[in-house]
Amino acid sequence: MVGELGRVTGAIGPGLVGEVMVRVRGGAEAFLAYAAEPGERIERGTLVLVVEYQPPRTVYVSPAYG
């Protein structure tokens, strides 16, 4: 899971639990998402990199290109 790319489907930011769609097992699955950098806001539609995974459905992400 760490190192995979995903797309933000629900904004991530302070006080928000966002959502990211990540391709796994031949499909795409939704994960609860938090910004890897505290206080960072990541808007819907942003391509992100998974930097930490906490089973079963939580990821910490950073913008893939930025």
Image: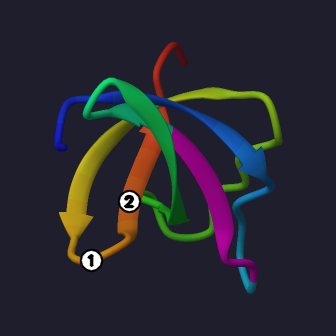
How far across and how far down the image is residue 21, in percent? 56, 42
Apparent side of residue 27 relative to residue 19 in the rendered image (left or right): left
Q: Is residue 50 above or below residue 11?
A: above
How far across and how far down the image is residue 31, in percent? 49, 61
Question: Separation of disc 1 and disc 2 at Cα?
Answer: 13 Å
**Label 1 crowd (10 A; few <14 / some 14-19 / many >=20):** few
Q: Name which residue type carries label 1.
A: Pro
- Name of the residue lying farthest toward the bottom: 15
Residue 56, located in which quarter of the rendered image? bottom left
Q: In the rendered view of the protein, which quadrant contains the N terminus?
A: top left
Q: Name which residue type carries label 2.
A: Tyr
Q: Which residue in the protein does label 1 denote?
A: 56
Of 19 and 43, nearer the camera is 19
Q: In the rendered view of the protein, which quadrant contains the C terminus?
A: top right
Apparent side of residue 66 relative to residue 5 in the rendered image (left or right): right
Q: Which residue in the protein does label 2 denote?
A: 60
Residue at 17% over, 42% down: 2
Apparent side of residue 63 relative to residue 56 in the rendered image (left or right): right
How far across and how far down the image is residue 5, in percent? 39, 25
